[in-house]
Amino acid sequence: MNAAVIVEKCERWIICIPGYLQRRGSAAAAIPDLHAQLRTRHSSPTCWVELLPWKSDWKSIAQWIAQTSVEKPRIDVFAYSWGVGYGLIRLARELRKHGLEIHTAVLSDGVAHVGPHPIARFLAFLPFWTIRIAKNVGRVWSFRQTNSLLRGHHIQRAEPPGAYITIALDPDRVHRTMDESPHFVGICQAVAAEGGSR
């Protein structure tokens, strides 16, 4: 006798995207640590909590999300540094091709990714770059600092009107500790706790 296998579709995604040097087990692992906390509290068969490197194959990931989710899942993204300027930007672009939106993005010291050439790492230290957030991203919280040479770049909507962007300066931090900011972590936890599908 064949038993039917019922696979529940995902209603909610919580996606954490760390920065350039961050990975599980590294000394600079605040986003992986946040992911572990959120996964413990919120992971379920219908709520997937994922830690995805900033340079992931975002086209494949967007396709995976579209194939395993309900029609309009709630997707929240928590990102830091190049996780903002590369990861979030490309994920939003690929999700849009599937008619999907990011409900809320909470960003910490987003740094523009200006190209694959090794010199791009040094160009990231220039302060005049702008990170343009796509129209399929809803609420945006952006935390930045101006204390270190490497600092978060300006965040703006690529296509107005778009939802309001909340920008907050953190005067007590430098870039390498911005993802540990209690303000950033607190908003991530509050957004994750909202629950429900969009």
Image (cartoon, rainbow, N blue to C red):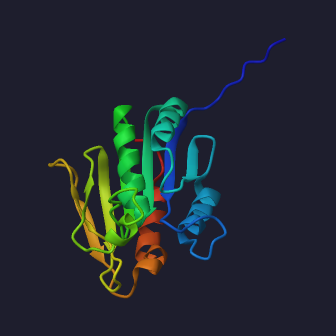
Quarter holding the C terminus is top left
Q: Is residue 27 visible?
A: yes
For the point 57% across and 51% down, which residue is it?
Answer: 49
Q: Is residue 181 visible?
A: no
Hey, which residue is sitting farthest left in the picture? Answer: 161
In the drawing, does residue 167 fall left or right of residue 160?
right
Q: Nearer the viewer, residue 157 or 138?
A: 157
Hey, which residue is sitting farthest top in the picture? Answer: 1
For the point 34% across and 81% down, which residue is it?
Answer: 170
Residue 184 quadrant: bottom left
Q: Position of residue 18 (x, y in %)?
A: 50, 63
For the point 32% across and 59% down, which residue is it?
Answer: 114
Quarter holding the N terminus is top right
**Residue 74, placed above or below residue 143:** above
Q: Nearer the viewer, residue 180 or 94?
A: 94
Q: Position of residue 113 (x, y in %)?
A: 35, 60
Question: How many marks on residues?
Answer: 0
Q: Position of residue 37 (x, y in %)?
A: 60, 64
In the drawing, does residue 153 fall left or right of residue 39?
left
**Residue 75, placed above or below residue 67:** below
Hey, which residue is sitting farthest right in the picture? Answer: 1
Residue 95 quadrant: top left
Residue 101 quadrant: top left
